[in-house]
Structures are given as structure tokens and as C-alpha cells.
Image (cartoon, helix red, strand yellow):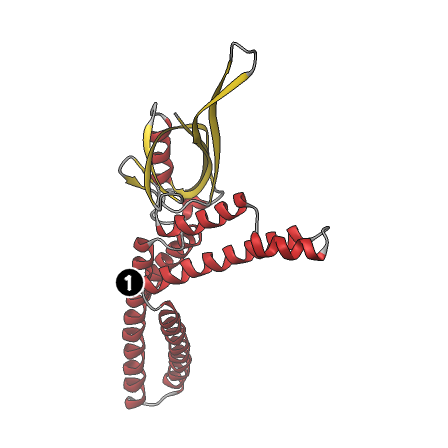
Amino acid sequence: MNKEIRDTQSNLKDVDKLLKMDPGNADLLAQKQKYLTDAIDATKKKLAEEKEALAQLKAGPQTEETQKQQEALTREIEATKQFLEGLEDEYKKFGSVAGQQLQVAGDKMKEAGGKISDVGEGLTKGITVPVAAVGAACRPCHPEEQLSVRRAIMLSEYPIYFDETKLISPSSWNESYAVVESTNQTEAGTDQVIVTRYDKLSVSASFQCSAGWAAKFAAFRDKDSFEVKLYDLKTQDYKTRTMRIRNFKSSPEKNSEKTKGTNGLYTVSFDLEEF
């Protein structure tokens, strides 16, 4: 029984480590819920067995030795009760997988709101009060900052796809858009600029992930190109772009090979370039 509880606790610690990197991951949240339930059930059985053993000791011959055994078992029962209370409290706070995902989304929105406030304060510094008031009323933050904040919220609700592979949540995801244009000289000697695109996408991304995910990213690195499906803020729908990976980097986290079920944890970063 003690081994079963120790194994479950070890699994819980491993899942918690992974959830720190991807707190909204439904599979990991479901695993945590299962391990918490298993730990509570196993601890209740352990407590029942300890109480039964204590009752048998009290019903038997009373000697100095059995008295010591009863005292030790009583302490063990109290420790098991406290441990069980801690597990039940953690399970109560956990609630459900859906509830945890909503909480993660709410935290990201709260963080996004804080970023907007910080940028708004930055705009106000160094300018007069009337101008600041107009600026605050018309534009609370720089458009690029708004885009970054909105994208952070979108990523939690609309995941990224490489071909048909749904990605885990990135640690960072920074987009930039370039204008594709050509300049021709007219007969009059003036320059004529022809814009063919306004939104050629480049992305700088990083992920904290398991060895399995690091291998998946490396496989996409070796492709000449692949389809990237992203939620587009302008059209409010998914948009597919043909892209490739450049500047790929992958490094294992120290001592992470001890994390059960992962073969180590990795930090992977790369740039995405659109054709």
C-alpha cells in the first residue's frame, strides 16, 4: 500500500512539472485528476488498515511492547489523516479539467490586461496631461502591443497546427509582418512602388517540452516546407501559410532526465519564415 501511494505521488510530481510548462494541457490535467483520485483512494485504504491494526492491538494482550506499538501506530494514523486531508483539499481546489483550463485562460487574460495598463502608463509619461488624455481615450497602447496581447489570448483558445499536428502551447510566440514590394522607375524618372503583400509572416518561437515533442519539432526542421495553420486576428478565422524553420536550437534541461515518462525535458526555439 505504501509503495502504491509513493508511486502515485511520484507520478503527480512529474505531471505537475509538465503542467508548469503547459498549464492548459487537457491530457496532463486529466492525468493529474486521475492520480489525485488514486492517491485519495489508496490513502483511505491505508488509513482503514491502520485503524483495524490498532483495534486488534487494543483487543489483544496488553504488554509494554504492545503499548509501544499502539503509540507508534496512533502517530502513524494521525499522519495518514493529515496526508489524506491535504490530498482532498488539493482535489477540491483542482475541481475539473475544464475548470482548470478556464482558470488558465482567465489568468492569461488578466496578464494581458496588465500589459495593456503598463503600456498605457508608458505612453502617458513625458507628455502633457491634455495630450495624454486624448491618447488614452483613442489608443490605450501601441498597435503592435495590442496585437501581441491579443495573440497571447488567441493562442490559448485557438492552437497552432504544423500540417495536421496540433502543437502544445508555446513559451513564447512573437510575430512580425513584412511588406513585399517592388520599385520600378517610370519614364518620367519617378519611382513607382508596387505592393504585392502586406502580411508576409515571420515568427520567433520557443517551447518547453518533452523529448518526444523536441523530436517532432526536429522533424519539421528537416522539411523544406510545411503548412502552418494559425488563427488570423483580421479575418477571425484560421489561415494556412506555407512556412519553413530556420535557426533551430534544442537543449535539454539539467537533471530533467529524472522526470518520469518524458526522457528528459527540452527547450526548443526556432524562427518560422513564410514563403
Left or right position of 193 against 67 = right
The residue where tag 1 is placed is: 34
Name which quarter of the figure residue 161 lies in: top left
Rendered view: 87 above or below 13: below
Residue 80 seen anywhere in this rendered image of the structure: yes
Kindly state the secondary structure of the residue where label 1 is placed: helix
Who is closer to the viewer here, 25 or 34?
Answer: 25
Q: Residues within 10 Å of mark 1 (few under 14, many from 20)?
A: some
Instruction: State the image quarter where residue 212 is shown.
Output: top left
Residue that protrudes farthest toward the top in the picture: 187
- Location of the N terminus (image quadrant): bottom left
| Residue at 56%, 11% in the rendered image | 189
25 or 200: nearer the eye?
200
Q: Quadrant of residue 202?
A: top left
Give the position of the C terminus as an image quadrant.
top left
The answer to whether residue 253 is left or right of residue 139 is: left
Q: Is residue 163 left or right of residue 198?
A: left
